[in-house]
Amino acid sequence: MNTLLLAITAIALVVLVALVLRPLQEPEKAEPEEDERISPLLRGINYLLSDEPDLALQEMVQVARLRSEAADVYMALGEMFRSKGEIGRAVRIHQNLLARPDLPRSLHLQAHLALALDFQTGGLLDRALMQYQKALDIRSDHAGALEASLRIREQSSEWLLAEELLSRLERVRNESYSSHRAYLFSEMASQCCREKDRDGAAEYAARALELDSACAPARMVEIELALQAADDKAAEAGVGALWQHSREHFPLVISLLVTYETFYKKRGIDLLRRFCQQGRDAELVLTWLEVVANRFSRQQAMALCSELAFVPGTLRESLRLQALMGEEADPHAEFSRQWRLTAKNYSCEECGVEVVAVRWQCPQCHAWGTLHPKQKEKV
Ligand SMILES: [Zn+2]
């Protein structure tokens, strides 16, 4: 609360100094109402000093009411309350501001954006979207409002609405976001896949791959559709394309291949073996071993490991292998297994956040396609 008091005091003092100095600078324009404002300000400061911020705020609001240009005092107060997590107060301040008939047109946009941000911070996403829309009604090319609405649509898995906003953002900024758009279509494809809408899934996956052939989740939908239809040739082509275009995310497809056991035994094993022979790829081998141990048995994974002659080259690889191959009673193996359950496997190239399971959109910086498998473990 101390910072809050300091901030209110700072705003109060700035306004007070401005009011006291202004008649000196512009004596001919001195207006009687300014005196009216000084007294609530002094009362406000007095309340602040006696540690009564609520009463202080009431006085500040009174100051803001007395002159329309004092709207910026409201804006500053609202901003301050939001940053302190007092969302209800921030909302009330911005709503009061918007309800004022004398609010200058230029401030409408700012007030809608501020109110939207209040709602967004408070998790009221529908109301936030409504305010961003009002801001966009005033300035349809406001990139900030478009971007914030896009984020909310993504957060709510409303992929097509997100895609529409992304198109508008592309036009406003005159930039191409084809990779981002490909991810949105791939999310649509996955959603259709879960809802057993095979045609929809195929169509959106194709649109995603047309935009970005390296869009791994779209490729995986394509492979899953082929496996469901028992179209071995198409599945094999999809697996080959994933290997070619999205090598680092390729291991993610292995559990899918193993689920379709007939395909896996007939073609999958040979395909994976061939990829393993193309050069050392620890992520590929370890994921394959883990999937086999989970789906079949530890013995089969051990047999595969010696067939592939895999030797770990880093601490991370060694821990993964030990978690998999270690005896039940071995405390070192138990430690490795515990580590494996919580180990962060992906890190974001943009913001550095680390997560356990793959995500196509970074949970921290919201960029798409920026999470890569971690190669090393910090000691
Ligand atoms: Zn990030």
Image: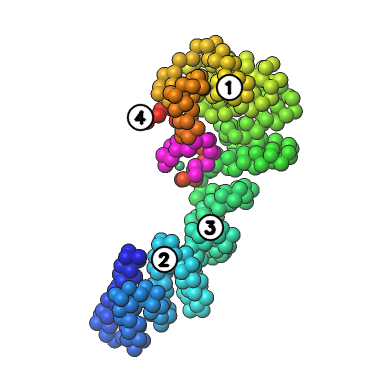
Element carrying mark 1: helix
Q: The residue under label 1 is which amino acid type?
A: Ala
Find residue 107 and report its horizontal and vertical position in percent.
Answer: 46, 70
Work out whether 220 lies above or below 176.
above
Secondary structure mostly taken by the magenta-highlighted segment of the chain: loop
- Determine the residue located farthest toward the front in the rendered image: 329
**Residue that label 1 marks:** 293
**Spatial separation of the CA atoms under disc 4 and disc 3:** 38 Å
Proximity of marks 4 and 3: CB atoms separated by less than 8 Å? no
Q: Which residue is mark 3?
A: 123
| Residue 65 drawn at (x, y percent) | 43, 80
Q: Position of residue 327 (x, y in %)?
A: 50, 19
Mark 2, Cα crowd under 10 Å, few <14 / some 14-19 / many 20+, is many
Q: Amino acid at mark 4?
A: Val
- Look at the image and tell me in which quarter the C terminus lies: top left
Nearest to the eye among marks 2 and 4: give it: 4
177, 301: nearer the viewer: 301
Q: Badge 3 local density, few (<14 within 10 Å), some, or many (20+)?
A: few
Q: CA distance from mark 3 to mark 1?
A: 42 Å
Q: Which mark is residue 379?
A: 4
**What residue is rendered at 49% in x and 44% in y?**
363
Residue range in magenta is 347-363
